[in-house]
């Protein structure tokens, strides 16, 4: 029992001594080159979360032939997505879209992507790539990548457009284009 009391007393004394030492010791502050909350580019931030909504258009490979484009095969719908940027340049994102037609599922396809953006003032071109799952028609895995452009004139609101090529496992590959608005936090 005396050993336990001795250990407790030693722990308490060590804790008090450390506390007193920590209060008296301060490290010099590094010189700040920017104001708090200010980044190299004031519109695109690290640790940024954003949500977006857009219109979607899909064009399949078989929509082209020697006579040109068959407009009857265009399919349109809506898309919702969320993104998180770990740094000002690198992030991840996910989105789901549904096409305007009679379908057996609420969401036609979901995808997850790695995104690399290049902010230049209010404009940020970006590239992305990843994979997802198609629920409509034939259930299958899809994967691909694309390019896009986001424009922000104010810190938390922007417009964007992107296009991607999706390779499907069981059916023909297809292209997807989105245009919409993005809210960032």
Image (cartoon, helix red, strand yellow):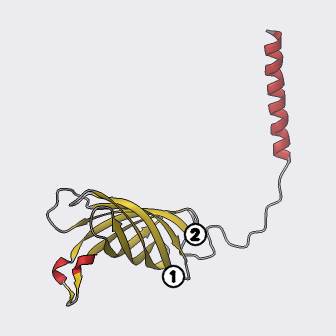
Q: Is residue 10 above or below residue 148?
A: above
Q: Nearer the viewer, residue 103 or 80?
A: 103
**Quarter in which the N terminus is drawn:** top right
Residue displayed at 42% across by 69% down: 183
**Residue 52, image x and y in percent?**
38, 68
Residue displayed at 57% across by 69% down: 88
136 sits to left or right of 34: left
Q: Quadrant of residue 21?
A: top right
Q: Which residue is mark 1?
A: 122
48 sits to left or right of 82: right
**Residue 12, image x and y in percent?**
80, 26
Circle 2 sits in a helix, a strand or a loop, which is it?
loop
Sequence-first disc among 2 and 1: 2
Residue lying at the far top of the rendered structure: 1
Q: Nearer the viewer, residue 74 or 24?
A: 74
**Residue 41, image x and y in percent?**
59, 77
Q: Nearer the viewer, residue 37 or 132?
A: 132
Q: Which residue is mark 2?
A: 88
Q: Nearer the viewer, mark 2 or mark 1?
A: 2
Q: How many marks can you see?
A: 2
Circle 1 sits in a helix, a strand or a loop, which is it?
loop
47 sits to left or right of 132: right
Residue lying at the far bottom of the rendered structure: 67
74 sits to left or right of 39: left
Q: Quadrant of residue 63?
A: bottom left
**Residue 11, image x and y in percent?**
80, 26
Residue displayed at 49% across by 68% down: 115
Residue displayed at 22% across by 89% down: 66
Q: Mark 1 Cα within 10 Å, few/some/many (few <14, many 20+)? A: some
Marker disc for residue 99? none
């Amino acid at each position: 029992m005396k050993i336990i009391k001795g250990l407790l007393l030693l722990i308490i004394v060590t804790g008090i001594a450390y506390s007193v030492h920590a209060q008296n010791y301060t490290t010099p502050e590094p010189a700040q080159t920017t104001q708090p909350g200010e980044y190299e580019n004031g519109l695109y931030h690290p640790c940024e979360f954003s949500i977006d909504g857009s219109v979607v258009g899909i064009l399949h490979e078989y929509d082209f032939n020697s006579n040109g484009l068959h407009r009857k095969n265009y399919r349109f719908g809506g898309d919702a997505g969320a993104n998180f940027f770990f740094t000002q340049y690198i992030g991840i994102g996910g989105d789901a879209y549904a096409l305007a037609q009679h379908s057996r599922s609420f969401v036609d396809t979901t995808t997850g992507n790695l995104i690399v953006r290049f902010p230049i003032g209010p404009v940020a071109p970006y590239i992305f790539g990843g994979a997802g799952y198609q629920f409509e028609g034939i259930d299958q895995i899809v994967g691909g990548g694309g390019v896009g452009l986001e424009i922000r004139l104010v810190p938390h609101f922007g417009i964007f457009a992107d296009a991607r090529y999706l390779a499907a496992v069981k059916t023909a590959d297809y292209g997807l284009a989105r245009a919409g608005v993005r809210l960032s936090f």
